[in-house]
Amino acid sequence: MKALPKELLDAYQKRNILVTGAGGFVGSSLIKALSEGDCTLFRLARGPLAPISGKAQVQDRAGDMEKPDTWCDIISKVDTVFHFAAQTSTYVAAENPLADMRINVEGMIHLLEALRKVRTKPVVLFSGTVTQVGMPGDLPVDESFPDSPVTLYDLSKLTAERYLKYYCSEEWIRGACLRLSNVYGPTSVPSKEDRGILNKIVRMALAGEPLSVFDRGKFVRDYIFVDDVVAAFLYAGVNAEKINGRHFVISSGKGVTIREAFQTAVDQVARKTGKKMTITDRDRPPGFSLIETRNFIGNPSAFIEATGWRPMFSLEEGLSRTVDSIVIAE
């Protein structure tokens, strides 16, 4: 990670911070950034978490968001919450919408209710998704675009966001939703899981597995490096009053086609390892979701103006670091 401004990290000194979804991609990366500070980190995850080093005091809790009895006793101790715990698959949501709702919506309500009862107006930063707007006809997308979800997953994320905004409007908490575009990059979690499509493509290229795209890979995406996302949440946390009750697009502001992004990943693998791969075309897979055919470029200007954050990594630099991290880990 590029060095974050000292004054930004200093703002978290002595804070008591809850990170839900602490074993996930963004959650674990944010914890790593905060671990060198003099703060207390409460890590909430469904399973055991790997130990981390640093100055921070770390307390772990195994539990589910929809089961508040497993974590509610720590709520009175926290002043800042980064809420990443979620069901994140469009296809899982379509197969089991009740389970998706329990995790994404009921989990949020349980968290908000516990925080409301504390009566200290803690800060809550929620991880949303840019796909909550559905299939935008014009680009780039900013916060003025109407929400029109086309998947059950996006509907549950939007519903959770609206609960957050309501609790902010009642002045029970302070908070905001950061709607993330396609996140990729190194992960501090020791895992073979694919965390983001570009991470999956890098792993496949390194393994020499066939790479292909449908519809010639023509659809446009806006990819953002995980370190930029971590920085965005940290900037949000120190600007809670300015952004309270709002949602923001968090993206690089640059669009590339899926094929161009995959090719950039393949080129980085070739440059570093000598392994050369060719991307081929294929038919759409069965059970294909409409959301896969969206074009998206975000406009993060509102968040930049409100907080001073800005994306720092180009796609090439981000993928270079991603390849390095996977090669070293393996």
Image (cartoon, grey):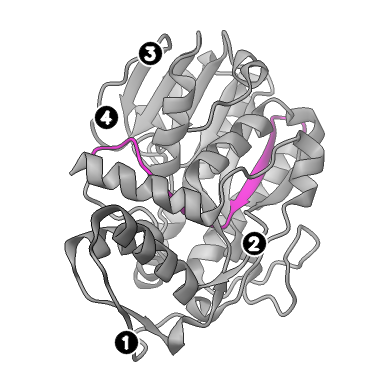
Query: Is residue 180 highlighted in magenta?
Result: yes
What residue does disc 4 label? Answer: 49
As measured in the structure, the alpha-carbon distance from the residue carrying label 3 to the one carrying label 2 is 35 Å
**Mark 3 or mark 4, which is nearer the start of the sequence?**
4
Local SS, label 3: loop
Does residue 312 appear to the left or right of 279 in the view shown? right
Q: Position of residue 88 (x, y in %)?
A: 42, 57
Q: Inspect the image, locate mark 4, and give the three-letter code of the amino acid beneath it.
A: Leu
As measured in the structure, the alpha-carbon distance from the residue carrying label 1 to the one carrying label 2 is 30 Å
Give the residue displayed 37% in from the left and 70% down from the top.
Answer: 91
Circle 3: is it few (<14), some (14-19), or many (20+) Cα within 10 Å? few
Q: Which mark, residue 286?
A: 1
> Dividing the picture into quarters, in which one does residue 281 lie?
bottom left
Q: How many marks?
A: 4
Q: Residue furthest bottom?
A: 283
As measured in the structure, the alpha-carbon distance from the residue carrying label 4 to the one carrying label 2 is 34 Å
